[in-house]
Amino acid sequence: MNETISLKESYKSMNCFSVMEVDFQHRCDLSMAVRNCKYIMNFFNYFEILYCNFDIRSIVKERLMMGFFIIIMILLMIMIVHLVDKYISPVLKILSIKLHLSEYLAGVTLLSLGNSLSDLIVNLMPIRGHAPIFTITISNALAVILLSGGMICFLRPFHINGYCAIRDLLFLLLGAEMLIYIVFSETVTTKGESIILSLLYVIFVLVMFLDHKLLQRTIQGLYKQVEKLEQLPYAPHTEEAIRRKLIKLRKLEEECKLVEDNYRSTEWTWRRSGQVALNRKFLAKISDEEQFDEKISRNALYNPENPKNMFLIEEFLRELIPIPLEWKFSGWCRRIYLIILAPMALFCAIFIPCLDYRQVKHGWSKLLNCTQIITNPVLCVALIETMIENEYTKRVPTIPFTYAKWTLCFTIPLAIAVFFMSRTDKPPPFHLMFIVLSLTASLLLLIICSTELEVLFCIIGLVFHRTEDFVAACIRSFAGAIGDVILNIDLAMEGYEKMAFAASLAAPLFSITMSMGVPCFFNVDAQEEYSHTWIYGEYGANAYVFFVLAIISTLWWTSILNFDARRSMGVYSFILFMLFFLYTTLAEWNLVHQLSGDPDFLPI
């Protein structure tokens, strides 16, 4: 009896990844007995699926299932790309326009927050309750800086805002040094230290807004000085002074340029040829006389003589078609991608409103948007309930509707009211409020996909007998950086390379400060004695050294090249990240020694 009780107690404290240490015939029973397996999984209990449902008893069958898991991971990545491209990126641009933010300010606030919020939430989840989060966070920051920043430099060379880039890089270095001190000071992380670390990001944002205000005041002051100089009698030195001030003024205005100004000069316009062309591949760039105005796309089909519900059903069905019009002009590779994407695109179209100033009527579809007022909150609340309760039925999560069903009391009357107050040929004045539904659902699905990716990456790494620290340093960090890289590349290719590069520096700072400070504040295990050993991990020093090397080298090449981002610097960033991956892999194979010191033990 006592042996049974002690065995149950050991199951309570056992890590789920210990399942991989026993023979195949015992893994099913152990995965069901270990309590930790129910907490670290997200929506599916993969260990029970592998060793109970599929009854795996050989390495060959196990490796074949890893191939199936890799296919699932590819589908999750495609889902992330679709969410970012169709929902998150357009909404962030709309918010930047409405808040009148400059490109750089939008990048370090809205875009970096959108990129890193999933990392913060994942760090609060049970799968990272006892994981080397220092290694994961620093490695993820390294991946974002080198891969995302490198891709931006390689695909869209541009002139970097020198003052802002140096300030952000120095804040990154300060954040990393503070994190090292907090982890190793007195071998325990206190709540006070966690709060101080989190406040560093708040200070950074305040400095950003203060700097933006000072820049605007400087521009206004230069305008006044130019006006005074123009009133003076003609003299060569006066003309030279005006010319110098105008050059300086032009540079400062370029740095302070609002997102909406860039949007108007780089986005696509539409042409009338019997119907409105929606495919950007066949649209012309806007000329100076033909500035883009969101009111044009908003009212493109509006006619007060039209019935309010004209083409209501046709429009609803057209929006639900998961294959876009570009199918006719795509090659076979693109068509395969669109076929794979189709089920996921249909699911998103049913539940998530699309707001995009590039589209006619800004993506408004009357009947579809009215149904999304009902379905979107039900989906979001049900998914959040599922993640909190974490109950499984036959290895799949039980989706409760305890609170989700009560949303119908508010959403059904609201949907009916919106239906009678709106038209099909023009979005209503309150269409902007759909941003709340769109951003909430898309970020929630992005977090779920990122978490599932991380779990699958961990399982695949452990099946191939890699240590948890190696998985944290290389595989988890790469998985966490995928969403950031995709979103930043998408924005850079649309002409927002400054915003994307700013987010490539600000998002790692958010991860180092908020994504480490908040979990350490709420995680009780992080506040216990000698918690630094598992927080730091075996490869924490590797990640830290390469991170500092990346920051210093970025400071070096930006200064040397007069803050001009070149393709060669993108190649250099890729090489540096591959060196980090190679060095960590060689350390995992015991071919080289990791950069951390050997552990010391007190004599007994």
Image (spheres, rainbow, N blue to C red):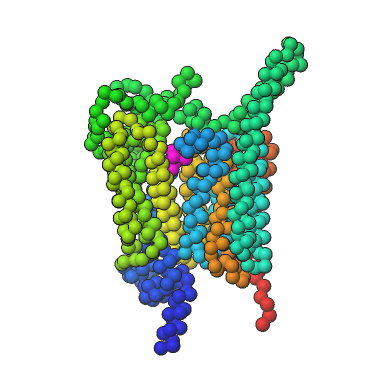
Q: Is residue 88 in the magenta section?
A: yes
Residue in the picture at 65% in, 68% down: 187
162, above or below 385, in the image: above
Q: Quadrant of the N terminus?
A: bottom left
Q: Nearer the viewer, residue 319 or 335?
A: 319
Residue in the picture at 26% in, 26% down: 306
Q: Nearer the viewer, residue 547 or 228?
A: 228
Q: Is residue 337 in the magenta section?
A: no
Residue in the picture at 62% in, 51% down: 200
Q: Nearer the viewer, residue 271 or 22?
A: 271
Which region of the structure is painted magenta? 86-92
Q: Position of residue 19 (x, y in %)?
A: 43, 72
Q: Position of residue 230 (x, y in %)?
A: 69, 15
Q: Position of residue 454 (x, y in %)?
A: 46, 58
The answer to whether any part of residue 152 appears in the image is: no
571, above or below 453, in the image: above
The answer to whether any part of residue 482 appears in the image is: yes
Q: Nearer the viewer, residue 486 or 210?
A: 210
Q: Quadrant of the C terminus?
A: bottom right
Q: Is residue 444 left or right of residue 180?
A: left
